[in-house]
Structures are given as structure tokens and as C-alpha cells.
Image (cartoon, rainbow, N blue to C red):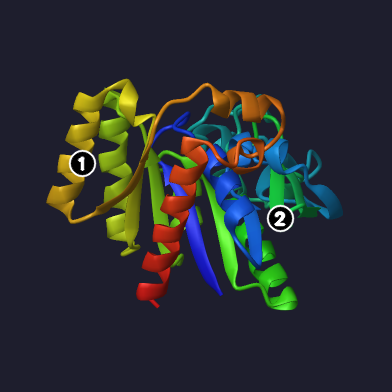
């Protein structure tokens, strides 16, 4: 199977909207929503869960009061000031485990806790792997990997030829977990100062992991000067701009209706542009095989 990740250097560029439209155009596909910190692909694809299980991605320290000698070494070693008067403040604790490691009487143990839920669902476009991270929970990179593994298992079991990944924005751990090992990355950007800056950063991450990248400029007509700057930067880096999508309020209308752009207005200029971009992405994917 092949894997395509749609990512962005910053939030709000239209990455999820584009991913949903790609899902409507793709064939024999498994969709994976790996933006687990702010998952919203389900709003457009309306998944029906067929399997659900807990995700345990973080640990919390438990102090055995009988074994504790109150030496204070754990409190001294904690960089997050999470231990006061031999009690752990879970709001401050990062689960690093230093306290358990340094305790001379082994009075502190680490216990896994539920950080979120992972789902396997059905959508009108095919199966979907997704998740929901608990409030204020971390370790989302591990959950991203868990979602990708679920998607890969589905693809193997059902002989699906393509996995379409809706990745998170930024350049952090969840992004790295989303793009590592994929065949192709489509980076969605917008013609703003922050869009240009963050695009350059995420392309650097993709280059570091030797993942072939394409760039899509969304809402290109809101600032054509910045659009040209993005195109020039991509030329210098030898990266193809696979397409430019104009701003259109119809995209918001489709979102409110709970539909992809392709479904809501199949004959519109934007739908035709997205279809052209998708065909170019597939051509690039096949050429890189």
C-alpha cells in the first residue's frame, strides 16, 4: 500500500477540508485522522464507530506511603515542582519517571493512565482510523502512531491500496509521527507572512526525513504577492507547487452542511481545481513507485 500525508506548517490553512475532498475522490482508500489534538475530520466524513478501545500513552507516579521514608529526594529531583510534601500534583507532573528512578526505597511506582480513545469506523468513502485525546493530555505522537498502525492493519486486512493521512499542523512530535515512512507529503499553505514562514519550517522537517513533498497554496488570491513569494521559495528548493485554490465562501457553506466540497458543489471551480490537484498527486505517487 501507499501512504500520503496532508500536513501544514500552521493551523487554519484548509488541510482537513482538502483531505476530506481527496477522500471523496480516492478509490480503495483508508482515511486516518492523525490530528489527534484537534480532530475534526469526523465532522465532514461522519464516521460510524465499529471498534473503540482505550489508549494509554502516559504514566503517573504513585507514592506508597508505607514504604516512603520522606527523604525528600523525589521533591528535589522533580524539575516540574510536581511533588510537594510527598504528594504528587498531577496537573504539574509530566510523567518523566525521575522520581521513581531516584527513590532509594522504591516507594514510587509509575502507573499507566487512560489518555484517550482510538476508533475504527466506517464512512461513506471507506474505513477510517481516528482518535480522541483526553483534555489536557499529551503523548499525542504516540497516539498518532497508534492511529497509523490501525489504518495500516485495516488496509492489509481489506486489501486497500492507499492510506490518506490528515496530519496535524506545526513541526512537533505529532507531525513527525504523521510523516515518517510515508510515500508522499502534500503541504497545504496560505499566502500570509506566517504561512510562508511555517511552510519553510515544515518543508525542512520533510527534507530531514527524506520524504518527497508537494505544495498546495490555498486561498491564493487573498494575497497574490505572497503567493508569488511561496512559488519562488519552492522553486529554489526544487519543490513542485501542485496547485492553487482560490478563496470561495462556498467552502464554508459545504463545511456547515457537513459535506466535502466535491459533494456539495461538484461542478464548481474549486472542485475542478481540487480534482486536478488530486490527479497530479496520484501521478507523482505513481512515478515515485
Q: Quadrant of the N terminus?
A: bottom right
State the mark number for residue 231. 1
Q: Are marks 2 and 1 in contact (CB under 8 Å)?
A: no
Of the pair 256 and 92, the residue shown nearer to us = 256
Q: Residue 42 is drawn in which quadrant?
A: top right
Q: Is residue 86 left or right of residue 190?
A: right
* Observer able to see residue 110: no
Residue where numbered disc 2 is placed: 125
Q: Residues within 10 Å of mark 1 (few under 14, many from 20)?
A: some
Number of numbered discs overlaid on the protein picture: 2
Q: Residues within 10 Å of mark 2 (few under 14, many from 20)?
A: some
Residue 92 screen position, x and y as percent: 60, 28
N-terminal of the pair, mark 2 or mark 1, is 2
Of the pair 46 and 11, the residue shown nearer to us = 46
Residue at 19% from the left image edge and 25% from the top image edge: 225
Residue 143 screen position, x and y as percent: 63, 51
Amino acid at each position: 500500500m501507499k501512504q500520503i500525508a496532508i500536513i501544514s506548517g500552521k493551523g487554519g490553512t484548509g488541510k482537513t477540508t482538502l483531505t476530506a475532498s481527496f477522500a471523496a475522490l480516492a478509490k480503495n482508500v483508508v482515511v486516518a485522522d492523525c490530528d489527534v489534538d484537534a480532530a475534526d475530520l469526523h465532522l465532514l466524513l461522519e464516521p460510524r464507530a465499529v471498534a473503540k478501545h482505550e489508549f494509554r500513552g502516559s504514566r503517573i507516579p504513585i507514592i506508597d506511603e508505607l514504604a516512603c521514608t520522606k527523604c525528600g529526594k523525589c521533591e528535589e529531583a522533580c524539575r516540574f515542582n510536581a511533588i510537594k510534601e510527598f504528594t504528587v500534583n498531577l496537573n504539574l507532573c509530566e510523567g518523566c519517571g525521575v522520581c521513581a528512578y531516584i527513590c532509594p526505597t522504591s516507594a514510587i511506582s509509575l502507573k499507566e493512565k487512560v489518555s484517550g480513545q482510538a476508533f475504527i469506523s466506517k464512512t461513506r468513502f471507506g474505513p477510517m482510523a481516528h482518535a480522541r485525546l483526553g483534555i489536557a493530555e499529551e503523548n499525542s505522537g504516540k497516539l498518532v502512531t497508534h492511529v497509523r498502525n490501525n489504518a495500516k492493519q485495516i488496509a492489509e486486512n481489506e486489501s486497500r491500496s492507499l492510506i490518506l493521512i490528515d496530519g496535524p499542523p506545526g513541526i512537533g512530535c505529532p507531525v513527525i509521527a504523521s510523516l515518517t515512512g510515508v510515500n508522499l507529503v502534500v503541504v497545504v499553505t496560505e499566502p500570509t507572512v506566517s504561512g510562508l514562514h511555517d511552510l519553510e519550517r515544515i518543508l525542512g522537517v520533510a527534507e530531514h526525513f527524506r520524504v518527497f513533498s508537494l505544495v498546495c497554496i490555498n486561498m491564493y488570491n487573498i494575497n497574490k504577492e505572497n503567493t508569488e513569494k511561496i512559488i519562488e521559495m519552492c522553486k529554489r528548493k526544487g519543490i513542485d507547487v501542485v496547485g492553487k485554490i482560490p478563496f470561495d465562501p462556498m467552502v464554508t457553506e459545504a463545511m456547515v452542511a457537513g459535506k466535502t466540497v466535491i459533494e456539495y458543489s461538484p461542478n464548481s471551480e474549486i472542485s475542478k481545481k481540487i480534482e486536478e490537484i488530486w490527479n497530479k498527486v496520484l501521478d507523482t505517487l505513481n512515478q515515485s513507485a
